[in-house]
Amino acid sequence: MASAISFVILVAVSCATVARTHPIHHRHFTDQVSKDKCLAKCMLPVTDYGEELSILKNTDLAYYFEKHDTICGIINTARLCIEACGIQSNPFAMEHMIGHCTPDAIQRVRHVHKCLKTTESRIHSDCERSCGNHKLVNDAAHNLTVKLSTSETNYTAEEVDPIIAHMGNACTIYTCMARCNVAGVRNYCGAGEAESLQGLIQYILDAHRRDLERHRVLEQFAHQTPPPCSYMYQPQILFFGMGHENKQQSVSNQIHQQDPIQRQTYQKPQNTDDTKLQILLKQLEVLLRQEKLLEKQNEKLDLEVSLLSRKLPAGQETPFRA
Protein backbone atom coordinates (compact mmCIF):
# COMPACT_ATOMS: atom_id res chain seq x y z
CA MET A 1 0.00 0.00 0.00
CA ALA A 2 1.28 3.48 -0.83
CA SER A 3 2.39 5.54 2.13
CA ALA A 4 0.59 8.65 3.38
CA ILE A 5 3.42 10.77 1.98
CA SER A 6 2.96 9.16 -1.42
CA PHE A 7 -0.73 9.98 -1.30
CA VAL A 8 -0.13 13.65 -0.41
CA ILE A 9 2.28 14.00 -3.32
CA LEU A 10 -0.14 12.29 -5.69
CA VAL A 11 -2.90 14.65 -4.59
CA ALA A 12 -0.65 17.67 -5.08
CA VAL A 13 0.36 16.51 -8.54
CA SER A 14 -3.06 15.52 -9.79
CA CYS A 15 -4.74 18.62 -8.36
CA ALA A 16 -1.96 20.95 -9.38
CA THR A 17 -2.03 20.70 -13.14
CA VAL A 18 -0.09 23.97 -12.98
CA ALA A 19 1.98 23.59 -9.83
CA ARG A 20 3.10 20.11 -10.83
CA THR A 21 5.40 21.84 -13.31
CA HIS A 22 7.58 22.91 -10.37
CA PRO A 23 10.76 20.77 -10.13
CA ILE A 24 10.07 19.90 -6.49
CA HIS A 25 6.70 18.30 -7.35
CA HIS A 26 8.12 16.59 -10.41
CA ARG A 27 11.08 15.12 -8.50
CA HIS A 28 8.94 13.92 -5.59
CA PHE A 29 6.37 12.40 -7.92
CA THR A 30 8.91 10.44 -9.98
CA ASP A 31 10.62 9.27 -6.77
CA GLN A 32 7.36 7.97 -5.31
CA VAL A 33 6.33 6.20 -8.51
CA SER A 34 9.74 4.52 -8.79
CA LYS A 35 9.46 3.25 -5.20
CA ASP A 36 6.00 1.73 -5.63
CA LYS A 37 5.86 -1.06 -8.24
CA CYS A 38 2.07 -1.24 -8.19
CA LEU A 39 1.74 2.50 -8.73
CA ALA A 40 4.42 2.41 -11.44
CA LYS A 41 2.42 -0.23 -13.32
CA CYS A 42 -0.73 1.86 -13.07
CA MET A 43 1.07 4.90 -14.49
CA LEU A 44 2.34 3.07 -17.59
CA PRO A 45 -0.75 3.83 -19.77
CA VAL A 46 -0.53 7.48 -18.73
CA THR A 47 3.16 7.82 -19.56
CA ASP A 48 2.76 5.79 -22.77
CA TYR A 49 0.05 8.19 -23.96
CA GLY A 50 2.57 10.98 -23.50
CA GLU A 51 0.14 13.90 -23.73
CA GLU A 52 -1.78 16.05 -21.26
CA LEU A 53 -5.00 14.41 -20.07
CA SER A 54 -6.66 17.53 -18.69
CA ILE A 55 -8.73 19.95 -20.73
CA LEU A 56 -7.13 22.66 -18.58
CA LYS A 57 -3.83 21.94 -20.33
CA ASN A 58 -5.22 21.67 -23.86
CA THR A 59 -6.26 24.54 -26.11
CA ASP A 60 -6.65 22.66 -29.41
CA LEU A 61 -10.09 21.42 -28.49
CA ALA A 62 -10.86 19.74 -31.82
CA TYR A 63 -7.77 17.56 -31.33
CA TYR A 64 -8.51 16.96 -27.62
CA PHE A 65 -12.17 16.05 -28.18
CA GLU A 66 -11.20 13.75 -31.07
CA LYS A 67 -9.23 11.69 -28.53
CA HIS A 68 -11.68 12.15 -25.66
CA ASP A 69 -12.82 8.50 -25.55
CA THR A 70 -9.18 7.37 -25.41
CA ILE A 71 -8.39 9.91 -22.68
CA CYS A 72 -11.34 8.79 -20.56
CA GLY A 73 -10.28 5.17 -21.05
CA ILE A 74 -6.75 5.95 -19.80
CA ILE A 75 -8.08 7.84 -16.78
CA ASN A 76 -10.54 5.08 -15.89
CA THR A 77 -7.90 2.35 -16.31
CA ALA A 78 -5.49 4.24 -14.03
CA ARG A 79 -8.29 4.85 -11.51
CA LEU A 80 -9.22 1.17 -11.26
CA CYS A 81 -5.58 0.07 -11.18
CA ILE A 82 -4.61 2.45 -8.36
CA GLU A 83 -7.76 1.46 -6.49
CA ALA A 84 -6.59 -2.16 -6.67
CA CYS A 85 -3.20 -1.09 -5.27
CA GLY A 86 -4.93 -0.11 -2.05
CA ILE A 87 -4.07 3.59 -2.12
CA GLN A 88 -6.34 5.32 0.37
CA SER A 89 -7.71 8.00 -1.93
CA ASN A 90 -7.34 7.69 -5.66
CA PRO A 91 -6.03 10.77 -7.53
CA PHE A 92 -7.54 9.52 -10.79
CA ALA A 93 -10.93 9.37 -9.10
CA MET A 94 -10.81 13.08 -8.32
CA GLU A 95 -13.74 15.02 -9.68
CA HIS A 96 -11.71 17.25 -12.01
CA MET A 97 -9.99 14.18 -13.48
CA ILE A 98 -12.99 11.90 -14.05
CA GLY A 99 -15.87 14.39 -14.14
CA HIS A 100 -15.66 15.14 -17.86
CA CYS A 101 -16.05 11.41 -18.55
CA THR A 102 -19.56 11.12 -17.11
CA PRO A 103 -22.40 10.40 -19.57
CA ASP A 104 -23.73 13.98 -19.44
CA ALA A 105 -20.30 15.51 -19.98
CA ILE A 106 -19.51 13.11 -22.84
CA GLN A 107 -22.71 14.17 -24.63
CA ARG A 108 -21.66 17.81 -24.31
CA VAL A 109 -18.18 17.01 -25.60
CA ARG A 110 -19.65 15.27 -28.66
CA HIS A 111 -22.03 18.18 -29.21
CA VAL A 112 -19.18 20.70 -29.27
CA HIS A 113 -16.84 18.39 -31.20
CA LYS A 114 -19.38 18.10 -34.01
CA CYS A 115 -19.27 21.89 -34.32
CA LEU A 116 -15.47 22.05 -34.21
CA LYS A 117 -15.14 19.46 -36.96
CA THR A 118 -17.26 21.56 -39.30
CA THR A 119 -14.97 24.58 -38.83
CA GLU A 120 -11.91 22.65 -40.10
CA SER A 121 -9.61 24.03 -37.35
CA ARG A 122 -10.39 27.65 -38.26
CA ILE A 123 -11.33 28.53 -34.69
CA HIS A 124 -8.11 27.13 -33.26
CA SER A 125 -5.96 28.76 -35.93
CA ASP A 126 -7.60 32.16 -35.50
CA CYS A 127 -7.36 31.98 -31.72
CA GLU A 128 -3.76 30.80 -31.70
CA ARG A 129 -2.74 33.68 -33.95
CA SER A 130 -4.31 36.09 -31.50
CA CYS A 131 -3.38 34.42 -28.20
CA GLY A 132 -0.13 32.54 -28.84
CA ASN A 133 0.99 28.91 -28.94
CA HIS A 134 0.02 27.35 -25.61
CA LYS A 135 1.59 23.96 -26.30
CA LEU A 136 4.94 25.52 -27.19
CA VAL A 137 5.12 27.48 -23.94
CA ASN A 138 3.76 24.63 -21.82
CA ASP A 139 6.29 22.20 -23.31
CA ALA A 140 9.09 24.67 -22.61
CA ALA A 141 8.09 24.79 -18.94
CA HIS A 142 7.87 21.00 -18.78
CA ASN A 143 11.27 20.46 -20.42
CA LEU A 144 12.97 22.88 -18.02
CA THR A 145 11.24 21.15 -15.12
CA VAL A 146 12.47 17.71 -16.16
CA LYS A 147 15.97 19.06 -16.66
CA LEU A 148 16.15 20.58 -13.18
CA SER A 149 14.33 17.78 -11.36
CA THR A 150 16.65 15.12 -12.79
CA SER A 151 19.80 17.09 -12.08
CA GLU A 152 22.09 15.58 -9.46
CA THR A 153 22.89 19.02 -8.05
CA ASN A 154 20.52 21.27 -6.16
CA TYR A 155 18.96 24.02 -8.23
CA THR A 156 18.65 27.67 -7.26
CA ALA A 157 15.64 29.96 -7.14
CA GLU A 158 17.07 31.80 -10.16
CA GLU A 159 16.96 28.55 -12.15
CA VAL A 160 13.30 28.04 -11.24
CA ASP A 161 12.30 31.59 -12.25
CA PRO A 162 12.17 30.83 -16.01
CA ILE A 163 9.85 27.89 -15.31
CA ILE A 164 7.50 30.09 -13.28
CA ALA A 165 7.58 32.66 -16.08
CA HIS A 166 6.68 30.01 -18.67
CA MET A 167 3.88 28.75 -16.41
CA GLY A 168 2.46 32.27 -16.14
CA ASN A 169 2.71 32.79 -19.89
CA ALA A 170 1.00 29.45 -20.56
CA CYS A 171 -1.87 30.41 -18.26
CA THR A 172 -2.24 33.82 -19.92
CA ILE A 173 -2.46 32.09 -23.29
CA TYR A 174 -4.92 29.51 -21.92
CA THR A 175 -7.19 32.28 -20.60
CA CYS A 176 -7.17 33.99 -23.98
CA MET A 177 -7.69 30.70 -25.86
CA ALA A 178 -10.57 29.54 -23.63
CA ARG A 179 -12.44 32.80 -24.11
CA CYS A 180 -11.63 32.85 -27.82
CA ASN A 181 -12.73 29.23 -28.33
CA VAL A 182 -16.09 29.96 -26.73
CA ALA A 183 -16.53 33.12 -28.83
CA GLY A 184 -15.56 31.24 -31.99
CA VAL A 185 -17.96 28.37 -31.31
CA ARG A 186 -20.74 30.88 -30.66
CA ASN A 187 -20.02 32.65 -33.94
CA TYR A 188 -19.73 29.52 -36.11
CA CYS A 189 -22.24 27.16 -34.47
CA GLY A 190 -24.51 29.13 -32.17
CA ALA A 191 -25.21 29.90 -28.53
CA GLY A 192 -26.12 26.34 -27.50
CA GLU A 193 -22.76 24.86 -28.45
CA ALA A 194 -20.91 27.82 -26.90
CA GLU A 195 -22.79 27.43 -23.63
CA SER A 196 -21.98 23.69 -23.57
CA LEU A 197 -18.27 24.41 -24.06
CA GLN A 198 -18.12 27.26 -21.57
CA GLY A 199 -20.11 25.27 -19.03
CA LEU A 200 -17.88 22.20 -19.47
CA ILE A 201 -14.67 24.16 -18.89
CA GLN A 202 -16.29 25.99 -15.97
CA TYR A 203 -17.31 22.67 -14.44
CA ILE A 204 -13.74 21.32 -14.59
CA LEU A 205 -12.45 24.51 -12.94
CA ASP A 206 -15.15 24.35 -10.25
CA ALA A 207 -14.29 20.68 -9.69
CA HIS A 208 -10.59 21.51 -9.42
CA ARG A 209 -11.38 24.04 -6.69
CA ARG A 210 -13.52 21.46 -4.86
CA ASP A 211 -10.69 18.91 -5.05
CA LEU A 212 -8.22 21.42 -3.59
CA GLU A 213 -10.64 22.10 -0.74
CA ARG A 214 -11.37 18.41 -0.10
CA HIS A 215 -7.70 17.61 0.32
CA ARG A 216 -6.92 20.84 2.18
CA VAL A 217 -4.18 22.00 -0.18
CA LEU A 218 -5.95 25.12 -1.43
CA GLU A 219 -3.79 27.61 0.44
CA GLN A 220 -0.56 25.83 -0.51
CA PHE A 221 -1.64 25.68 -4.14
CA ALA A 222 -2.58 29.36 -4.22
CA HIS A 223 0.78 30.32 -2.72
CA GLN A 224 2.72 28.37 -5.38
CA THR A 225 0.65 29.43 -8.39
CA PRO A 226 1.68 32.41 -10.57
CA PRO A 227 -0.97 35.20 -10.70
CA PRO A 228 -2.01 34.51 -14.34
CA CYS A 229 -2.92 30.94 -13.26
CA SER A 230 -5.20 32.03 -10.43
CA TYR A 231 -8.28 30.76 -12.30
CA MET A 232 -7.13 27.31 -11.17
CA TYR A 233 -8.27 28.10 -7.63
CA GLN A 234 -10.57 31.08 -8.31
CA PRO A 235 -12.63 29.49 -11.13
CA GLN A 236 -15.07 32.36 -11.52
CA ILE A 237 -12.49 34.66 -13.11
CA LEU A 238 -11.69 32.73 -16.32
CA PHE A 239 -14.82 33.85 -18.17
CA PHE A 240 -15.37 36.99 -16.11
CA GLY A 241 -17.11 39.69 -18.13
CA MET A 242 -18.09 37.44 -21.05
CA GLY A 243 -21.70 37.15 -19.96
CA HIS A 244 -23.82 33.97 -19.83
CA GLU A 245 -22.54 33.28 -16.29
CA ASN A 246 -25.91 31.93 -15.15
CA LYS A 247 -26.16 29.50 -18.07
CA GLN A 248 -22.58 28.27 -17.73
CA GLN A 249 -23.09 27.73 -13.99
CA SER A 250 -26.26 25.79 -14.75
CA VAL A 251 -24.33 23.51 -17.12
CA SER A 252 -21.56 23.10 -14.53
CA ASN A 253 -24.09 22.12 -11.88
CA GLN A 254 -25.81 19.62 -14.19
CA ILE A 255 -22.54 17.84 -14.93
CA HIS A 256 -21.61 17.85 -11.23
CA GLN A 257 -24.86 16.05 -10.42
CA GLN A 258 -23.89 13.29 -12.86
CA ASP A 259 -20.72 12.33 -10.97
CA PRO A 260 -21.53 9.13 -9.03
CA ILE A 261 -17.93 8.47 -7.88
CA GLN A 262 -17.63 11.78 -6.08
CA ARG A 263 -21.11 11.52 -4.52
CA GLN A 264 -20.06 8.25 -2.90
CA THR A 265 -16.56 9.24 -1.72
CA TYR A 266 -16.77 12.92 -0.87
CA GLN A 267 -16.90 13.91 2.77
CA LYS A 268 -16.95 17.61 3.55
CA PRO A 269 -13.95 18.65 5.69
CA GLN A 270 -14.87 19.55 9.25
CA ASN A 271 -13.49 23.04 9.77
CA THR A 272 -13.87 25.20 12.85
CA ASP A 273 -15.50 28.62 12.57
CA ASP A 274 -12.11 30.30 13.00
CA THR A 275 -10.60 28.26 10.18
CA LYS A 276 -13.53 29.08 7.91
CA LEU A 277 -13.12 32.78 8.68
CA GLN A 278 -9.42 32.63 7.88
CA ILE A 279 -10.15 30.92 4.57
CA LEU A 280 -12.76 33.54 3.68
CA LEU A 281 -10.36 36.36 4.51
CA LYS A 282 -7.66 34.74 2.37
CA GLN A 283 -10.12 34.38 -0.50
CA LEU A 284 -11.16 38.02 -0.16
CA GLU A 285 -7.53 39.09 -0.22
CA VAL A 286 -6.91 37.08 -3.40
CA LEU A 287 -10.05 38.44 -5.07
CA LEU A 288 -9.02 42.01 -4.37
CA ARG A 289 -5.63 41.35 -5.93
CA GLN A 290 -7.27 39.73 -8.93
CA GLU A 291 -9.50 42.71 -9.70
CA LYS A 292 -6.57 44.75 -10.97
CA LEU A 293 -5.15 41.76 -12.83
CA LEU A 294 -8.51 41.08 -14.49
CA GLU A 295 -8.79 44.66 -15.65
CA LYS A 296 -5.38 44.46 -17.31
CA GLN A 297 -6.08 41.05 -18.86
CA ASN A 298 -9.47 42.14 -20.23
CA GLU A 299 -7.96 45.30 -21.71
CA LYS A 300 -5.26 43.20 -23.40
CA LEU A 301 -7.79 40.67 -24.75
CA ASP A 302 -10.07 43.41 -26.08
CA LEU A 303 -7.13 45.06 -27.81
CA GLU A 304 -6.01 41.76 -29.39
CA VAL A 305 -9.52 41.02 -30.67
CA SER A 306 -9.77 44.54 -32.11
CA LEU A 307 -6.40 44.23 -33.85
CA LEU A 308 -7.32 40.82 -35.29
CA SER A 309 -10.60 42.17 -36.63
CA ARG A 310 -8.76 44.94 -38.46
CA LYS A 311 -6.36 42.47 -40.07
CA LEU A 312 -9.09 40.29 -41.58
CA PRO A 313 -9.92 40.85 -45.28
CA ALA A 314 -12.93 43.00 -46.01
CA GLY A 315 -16.17 41.05 -45.78
CA GLN A 316 -14.70 38.17 -43.75
CA GLU A 317 -16.32 37.59 -40.38
CA THR A 318 -14.21 37.37 -37.26
CA PRO A 319 -14.95 34.57 -34.73
CA PHE A 320 -14.79 37.14 -31.95
CA ARG A 321 -17.41 39.37 -30.51
CA ALA A 322 -16.72 42.51 -28.56
Image (cartoon, rainbow, N blue to C red):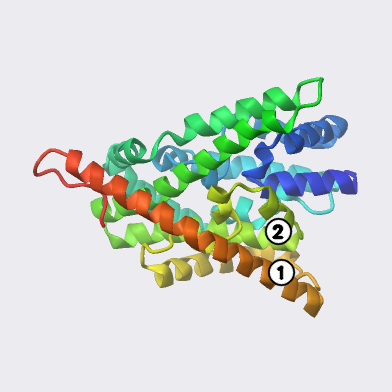
For the C terminus, the quadrant is bottom left
Residue 231: percent from the left, percent from the top?
54, 55
Residue 217: percent from the left, percent from the top?
74, 56
Residue 11: percent from the left, percent from the top?
75, 49
- Determine contact: label 1, label 2, CB under 8 Å: yes
Q: For residue 279, which numbered disc appears in the image?
A: 1
| Amino acid, disc 1 | Ile
- Above or below residue 50? Residue 242 is below
Query: Residue farthest to the top?
Result: 152
Mark 2 lies on residue: 218
Q: As rendered, which of 56 and 93 lies closer to the eye?
A: 56
Residue 97: percent from the left, percent from the top?
62, 50
- Above or below residue 237? Residue 39 is above
* Residue at 53% over, 60% down: 290
- Above or below residue 189? Residue 273 is below
Asked if one can make out residue 244 in the rendered structure from this viewpoint, the answer is yes
| Amino acid, disc 2 | Leu
Q: Quadrant of residue 263?
A: bottom right
Q: Earlier in the sequence, mark 1 or mark 2?
A: 2
Q: Secondary structure at mark 2?
A: helix
Q: As rendered, which of 69 and 148 lies closer to the eye?
A: 148
* Residue at 64% over, 57% down: 95
